[in-house]
């Protein structure tokens, strides 16, 4: 009985359990990506035009990205407290929007609707921050893949929630808003006590590589399955029973990764106590600041210098070899060969505060590259419903789900391949961002041309490129500016998303769309609405006009394509400036 209790405690404190629970939270946390599905319902129910809808989209992006409070609360409150705050915000914001759209409460002015959308989507920042902060600390040696998978599931949540909504089969499309309000809150409240740092660097095992491969396999299988199901449901009239079976299989695939912490905790032999002597303990970490820093550096050096074959040796021999290496490193530290850095202001690769990072050119290169690249991708995601309708497609949900899947694969693949770049070649991770931005540039051209079937290729390229940003950028920021204030740094960088959306969607795309819609209305002898100031429509509702044809988004897409090329240039400048940093961080992996 005592052994079973010990195994269960090991299961609860296993870092892979935290990772899997974070994956589940993220799989319903990307509610902002469903805006393309719920925006047509809001537009028709509240009689909005495209410019008014764009204002809601900007409010959604601001809520999704303004995470200063989430970053601060994650340092003050336990992570479960931050997750609870996010769940309440999500429920209140989108729940009220649902009540308005369904006519259960009076319609509010546009500015109030913007506040509700902001509050509802701001809950997502708490989910993201808690998941990333806990898992990056639990997996400090695998930042790229961990961030990529977690952000990937956030991107995939649009397709997952759409499939669940298809199974529920509500006749009222506004019910999707209700599911967005209630579903994520329920999942987060159920899992919020699991998400926390558990000293993951003390849980390194030889089987970690196999576990990571298994997770990647599940991710690829999940994406392929969802893509096949969505295409089948779009092309063929599928019965509700079959849709239910598809959704049950989806849940099975989502639950499969829990096998990893179960096997590690209940099936594998526990770690040899002799090995624990070599790993830092909490009481040792509190002995003193300088001793803590020195021990952490020595531990890090042991991990870097330890030959790979040591992990394959028997426990007693492995302990002896590591102990010998540790003694050598302590002697080297005493002689100055391993230098413990003194506090004289951080350099790139060390821990920065947000204020220290804000005066660095590299930080602003990341920010503006992200603004131009991800901002243009988010504009496509927010306007995909109108873009597909303008090209003559009636079922907008299929494209919203498809871009969600490509977004997921972009994040998973971006984290995986950028990790190969830094680990195997010690080359700066931002080079992967530049490649993603060039891919997006081509995708925008396909959207601009509006050729038959081009929307499928454009959705593929934009989804992959946009998703890659959110796997690569957080990992690169943690490498260049440290993990100590990662929550604040990450949440500041996410401001690039709404800033880009404000320019691309709120100003450029909506203005061009409404102008083309007015031209077409005049040609068909339809009286267009009277244009007012930039705040027109905040308190009144104009009769919406629709634009048809590729001309609706041609100019917008070409502008965004050009900005993606500029973003790639900024990323390559960052690559040039950080070559020595990455050579210092990862150069040893090439030997």
Image: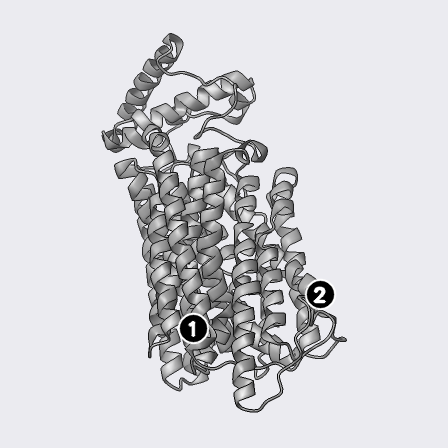
Q: Taking 240 as reference, is 193 left or right?
A: right
What residue is pinned by disc 1? 399
What residue is pinned by disc 2? 111
**Residue 476 placement: quadrant:** top left
Q: Secondary structure at mark 2?
A: helix
Residue 379 percent location from the top left of the image: 49, 63
Kindly give the residue lying farthest to the right in the view shown. 106
The 10 Å Cα crowd at callout 1, few under 14, some 14 to 19, many 20 or more, is many
Viewport quadrant of the C terminus: top left
Q: Nearer the viewer, residue 510 or 37?
A: 510
The 10 Å Cα crowd at callout 2, few under 14, some 14 to 19, many 20 or more, is some
Asked whether the viewer can see residue 393, the reply is yes
Asked whether the viewer can see residue 278, the reply is no
Residue drawn at point x = 54 percent, y = 42 percent: 196
Disc number for residue 421: none
Question: Colour scheme of this structure image?
Answer: one colour
Residue 250 percent location from the top left of the image: 42, 67
Question: Which callout, 1 or 2, points to the residue nearer the camera?
Answer: 2
Residue drawn at point x = 34 percent, y = 38 percent: 428
With respect to residue 393, does 583 lie above or below? above
Q: Nearer the viewer, residue 135 or 122?
A: 122
Q: Nearer the viewer, residue 102 or 579?
A: 579
Kindly give the residue lying farthest to the bottom in the view shown. 525
Residue drawn at point x = 37 percent, y = 50 percent: 568
Residue 347 percent location from the top left of the image: 46, 26
Residue 127 percent location from the top left of the image: 56, 52
Give whichever of discs 1 and 2 has the lower sequence position. 2
Kindly give the residue lying farthest to the top in the view shown. 335
Q: Secondary structure at mark 1?
A: helix
* Cα–Cα span, label 1 and label 2: 29 Å
Q: Taking 73 as reference, is 212 left or right?
A: left
């Amino acid at each position: 009985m005592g052994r079973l209790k010990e195994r269960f405690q090991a299961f609860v404190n296993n870092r892979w359990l935290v990772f899997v629970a974070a994956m589940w939270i993220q799989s319903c946390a990307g509610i902002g990506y469903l805006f393309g599905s719920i925006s047509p319902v809001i537009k028709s129910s509240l009689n909005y035009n495209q410019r008014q809808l764009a204002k809601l989209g900007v409010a959604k992006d601001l809520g999704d990205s303004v995470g200063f409070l989430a970053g601060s609360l994650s340092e003050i409150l336990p992570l479960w407290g931050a997750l609870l705050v996010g769940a309440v915000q999500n429920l209140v914001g989108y729940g009220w929007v649902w009540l308005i759209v369904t006519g259960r409460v009076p319609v509010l002015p546009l500015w109030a609707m913007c506040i509700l959308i902001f509050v509802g989507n701001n809950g997502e920042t708490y989910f993201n921050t808690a998941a990333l902060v806990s898992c990056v600390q639990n997996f400090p040696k695998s930042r790229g893949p961990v961030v990529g998978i977690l952000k990937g599931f956030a991107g995939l949540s649009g397709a997952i929630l759409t499939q669940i909504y298809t199974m529920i089969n509500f006749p009222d499309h506004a019910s999707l808003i209700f599911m967005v309000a209630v579903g994520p809150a329920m999942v987060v409240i159920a899992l919020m006590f699991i998400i926390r740092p558990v000293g993951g660097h003390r849980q390194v095992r030889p089987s970690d590589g196999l576990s990571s491969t298994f997770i990647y396999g599940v991710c690829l299988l999940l994406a392929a399955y969802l893509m096949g199901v969505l295409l089948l449901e779009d092309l063929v009239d599928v019965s509700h029973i079959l849709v239910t079976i598809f959704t049950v299989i989806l849940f099975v695939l989502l639950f499969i990764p829990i096998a990893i912490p179960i096997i590690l905790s209940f099936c594998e032999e526990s770690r040899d106590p002799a090995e624990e002597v070599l790993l830092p303990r909490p009481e040792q970490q509190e002995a003193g600041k300088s001793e803590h820093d020195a021990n952490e550096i020595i531990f890090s050096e042991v991990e870097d210098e330890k030959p790979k074959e040591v992990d394959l040796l028997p426990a007693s021999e492995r302990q002896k070899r590591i102990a010998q290496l540790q003694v050598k490193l302590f002697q080297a530290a005493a002689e100055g060969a391993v230098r413990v850095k003194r506090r004289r202001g951080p350099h790139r690769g060390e821990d920065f505060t947000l204020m220290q990072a804000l005066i660095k050119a590299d930080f602003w290169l990341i920010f503006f590259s992200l603004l131009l690249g991800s901002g243009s991708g988010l504009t496509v995601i927010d306007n995909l419903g109108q873009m597909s309708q303008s090209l003559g497609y009636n079922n907008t949900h299929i494209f919203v789900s498809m871009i969600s899947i490509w977004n997921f694969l972009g994040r998973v693949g971006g984290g995986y391949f950028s990790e190969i770049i830094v680990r195997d070649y010690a080359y700066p991770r931002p080079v992967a961002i530049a490649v993603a931005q060039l891919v997006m540039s081509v995708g925008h051209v396909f959207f601009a041309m509006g050729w038959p079937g081009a929307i499928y290729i454009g959705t593929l390229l934009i989804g992959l490129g946009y998703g890659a940003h959110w796997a690569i950028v957080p990992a690169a920021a943690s490498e260049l500016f440290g993990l100590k204030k990662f929550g604040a740094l990450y949440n500041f960088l996410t401001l690039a998303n709404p800033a880009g959306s404000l320019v691309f969607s709120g100003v450029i795309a909506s203005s061009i769309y409404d102008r083309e819609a007015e031209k077409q209305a005049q040609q068909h002898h339809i009286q267009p609405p009277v244009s007012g100031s930039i705040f027109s429509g905040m308190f009144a509702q104009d009769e919406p006009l629709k634009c048809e044809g590729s001309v609706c988004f041609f100019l917008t897409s070409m502008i965004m394509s050009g900005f993606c090329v500029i973003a790639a240039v900024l990323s390559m400048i960052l690559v040039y400036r950080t070559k020595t940093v990455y050579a210092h961080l990862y150069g040893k992996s090439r030997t």
